Image: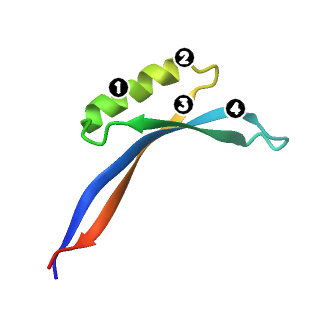
Amino acid sequence: MPVVSSPLATSLRLQVQTGTDVDGKPVYRMRSYSRVKPAAADQDAYDVAQALGSLQVHPINAISRVNENDLSATV
């Protein structure tokens, strides 16, 4: 039975370095941005994340795209 994947939602997650701990290791926090169009191209999503990151006080360490899909079996 084949499974069909239908996109539901997409969000962007930016990992930013907010400082260092007492041992000098970096401390990271996540910033999430929802309501991204699932059909948006990866390059466009990355460009938007970079633009949002430029507005942050803290530097970006990583950018992730999180896709949520509905899986259903076809008969």
Mark 1 neighbour density, 10 Å: few (under 14) some (14–19) many (20 or more) = few
Q: Earlier in the sequence, mark 1 or mark 4?
A: 4
Mark 4 neighbour density, 10 Å: few (under 14) some (14–19) many (20 or more) = some
**Looking at numbered disc 2 in the image, what kind of residue is underneath it?**
Leu
For image coordinates 80% across by 40% down, the residue present is 21
Q: Earlier in the sequence, mark 2 or mark 4?
A: 4
Q: Which residue is mark 1?
A: 47
In the rendered view, does 24 fall on the left or right side of 30?
right
58 vs 37: above or below: above
Which mark's residue is nearer the viewer, 2 or 3? Answer: 2
Q: Which residue is mark 3?
A: 60
Q: Which residue is mark 2?
A: 55
The front one of 27 and 43 is 43
Q: Earlier in the sequence, mark 1 or mark 2?
A: 1
Mark 2 neighbour density, 10 Å: few (under 14) some (14–19) many (20 or more) = few
42 vs 1: above or below: above
In the rendered view, does 39 fall on the left or right side of 34?
left
Query: Are the residues tagged 1 and 2 within 8 Å (C-beta)?
Result: no
**Which element carries disc 2, helix, strand or loop?**
loop
Q: Position of residue 38 (x, y in %)?
A: 30, 42
How far is disc 3 from disc 1 in space, using C-alphas? 13 Å
Q: Position of residue 4 (x, y in %)?
A: 20, 66
How far is disc 1 from disc 2 in space, using C-alphas? 13 Å
Which mark's residue is nearer the viewer, 3 or 1? Answer: 1
Q: How many marks?
A: 4
For image coordinates 32% across by 37% down, the residue present is 37
Q: Earlier in the sequence, mark 3 or mark 1?
A: 1
Q: Which residue is mark 4?
A: 18
